[in-house]
């Protein structure tokens, strides 16, 4: 009778034969079939460990052997310090900023990080680059969907006198509500004329009485010239010219008249129509033109000693009188006097430029620190037109060119960065070196660009000096 021990030994013997047949191809082999695999694996691990240890010892004794950074168009960054270099004729030249590196190479460089030991024996030269050039470039298209807001916050000087300043904010807030067509604001430059600002344009009020005549009696918003220059110029809001005012005119409905008098025609079911009598006939007046003539102090010459008042005219008399060829008001003026709008508490008036070329007037909260800052620094110049404070959203900026939307652009190209500085480019090819397409530049007006302080000229020859 077999014992349990005999059965276990028999099973182990059978399994050993099967394993030997599968692994070694010999069921009667006297050796363990796994021995070769174990010995080979251990030997391989030992050899690999020795090789790694050898390289480690060599690297410790002879560090800094890498020299792939010596290839052309490489921007070398020292690992330990972050210092940047370019290799010129076997000499490492520190480069002042990333923009200068692109200008030196004529394209985007390959950035390689190298240990200080690898650079220890390489001779150093004087720095290369443009002082004050940007160290980071906005992504192409970063100006898409942005709006430029030129604002006129009210300030007071030390004596409490109202002072003027202009701020510029460039961000992606393009949903500000613009003044509707029936509202306007009244602005004035210190010791200068008063303007009616309506539908993104400015109209000079050429007489003091014009503000009172249309209900703009309050104090105008005091602004700087740079704020007003953001708005295209419209025709002057001026009195309607009436040659020979006060001289006798033709009879109307059997009554004598004078040149310069006003008439009203009323027909049942129709709105009133107003007319001005010229020497060659009648001119129809819209609400704005009628208000200009009726409020004009010179109109009194056509009524003396009676007060100024429109005279009723029959439709038949209107049909008998010719239409005058005299002009009344330019078509670009508002047809109806707009009401004066208020910016609202805690808000200031701003001119909004969108990237599609739209211009309008809106109100928004004023810029505050730290977003609002006076931009200055090495290589940065400011002029009388520069904004008092500039705020550009992080990452916003790009290539712009002078011009007006809808017109042929100018030849000047500038790089605008989120540091609030514009950098003139030597020529359009510089834009391509920096990664921008000249034909993709945003069009910006000169008054708007003047608000930004100016950085140094970006040119390859200047970067290589």
Image (cartoon, grey):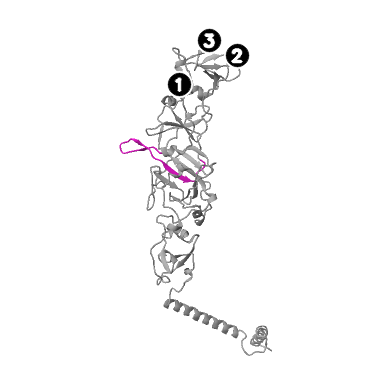
Is mark 2 in CB contact (under 8 Å) with mark 1? no
Q: Secondary structure at mark 3?
A: strand
**The N terminus - image quarter:** bottom right
For residue 40, what is the image quadrant?
bottom right
Q: Which residue carries the number 2 mark?
A: 316
Residue under the image location 47 percent in, 59 percent down: 102
Give the camera-side residue of 444 and 218.
Answer: 444
Q: Is residue 158 magenta?
A: yes
Q: Which residue is mark 1?
A: 296
Residue under numbered circle 3: 255
Q: Are marks 3 and 2 in contact (CB under 8 Å)?
A: no
Q: CA distance from mark 3 to mark 1?
A: 24 Å
Q: Position of residue 362 (x, y in %)?
A: 48, 37
Label 1: which secondary element: loop
Q: Earlier in the sequence, mark 2 or mark 1?
A: 1
> In this image, 319 relative to 225: left or right?
right
Sequence-wise, the earlier of marks 3 and 2 is: 3
Pick the residue in front: 175 or 236.
236
């Amino acid at each position: 009778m077999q014992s349990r021990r005999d059965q276990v030994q028999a099973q182990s013997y059978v399994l050993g034969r099967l394993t030997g047949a599968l692994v070694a191809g010999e069921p009667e082999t006297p050796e363990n079939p796994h021995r070769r695999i174990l010995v080979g694996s251990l030997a391989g691990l030992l050899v690999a460990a020795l090789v790694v240890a050898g390289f480690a010892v060599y690297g410790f004794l002879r560090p800094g052997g890498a020299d792939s950074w010596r290839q052309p168009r490489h921007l070398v960054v020292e690992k330990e310090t972050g210092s940047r270099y370019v290799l010129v004729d076997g000499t490492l030249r520190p480069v002042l900023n990333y923009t200068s590196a692109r200008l030196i190479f004529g394209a985007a460089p390959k950035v390689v990080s190298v240990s200080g030991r690898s650079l220890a024996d390489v001779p150093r030269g004087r720095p290369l680059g443009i002082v004050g050039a940007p160290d980071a470039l906005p992504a192409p298209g970063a100006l898409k969907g942005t709006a430029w807001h030129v604002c006129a916050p009210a300030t007071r000087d030390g004596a409490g006198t109202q002072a003027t300043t202009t701020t510029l904010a460039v961000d992606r807030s393009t949903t500000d509500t613009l003044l509707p067509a029936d509202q306007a604001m009244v602005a004035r430059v210190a010791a200068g004329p008063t303007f009616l600002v309506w539908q993104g344009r400015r109209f000079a009020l050429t007489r003091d009485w014009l503000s009172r005549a249309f209900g703009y009696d309050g104090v105008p918003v005091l602004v700087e010239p740079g704020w007003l220059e953001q708005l295209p110029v419209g025709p002057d809001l001026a009195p309607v010219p009436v040659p020979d005012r006060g001289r006798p005119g033709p009879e109307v409905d059997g009554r004598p008249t004078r040149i310069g008098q006003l008439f009203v025609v009323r027909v049942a079911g129709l709105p009133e129509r107003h007319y001005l009598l010229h020497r060659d006939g009648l001119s129809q007046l819209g609400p704005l033109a009628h208000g200009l003539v009726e409020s004009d102090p010179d109109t009194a010459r056509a009524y003396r000693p009676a007060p100024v008042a429109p005279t009723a005219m029959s439709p038949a008399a209107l049909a008998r009188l010719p239409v005058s060829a005299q002009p009344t008001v330019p078509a670009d003026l508002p047809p109806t006097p707009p009401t004066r709008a208020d910016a609202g508490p805690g808000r200031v008036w701003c001119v909004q430029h969108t990237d599609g070329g739209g211009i309008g007037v809106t109100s928004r909260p004023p810029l505050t620190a730290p977003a609002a800052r006076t931009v200055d620094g090495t290589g940065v110049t400011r002029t009388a037109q520069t904004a008092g404070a500039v705020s550009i959203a992080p990452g916003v900026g790009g290539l712009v060119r002078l011009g007006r939307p809808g017109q042929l652009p100018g030849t000047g190209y500038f790089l605008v960065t989120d540091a609030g500085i514009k950098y003139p480019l030597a020529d359009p090819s510089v834009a391509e070196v920096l990664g921008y397409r000249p034909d993709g530049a945003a069009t910006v007006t000169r008054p708007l660009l003047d608000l930004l302080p100016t950085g140094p000229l970006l040119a390859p020859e200047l970067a290589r000096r």
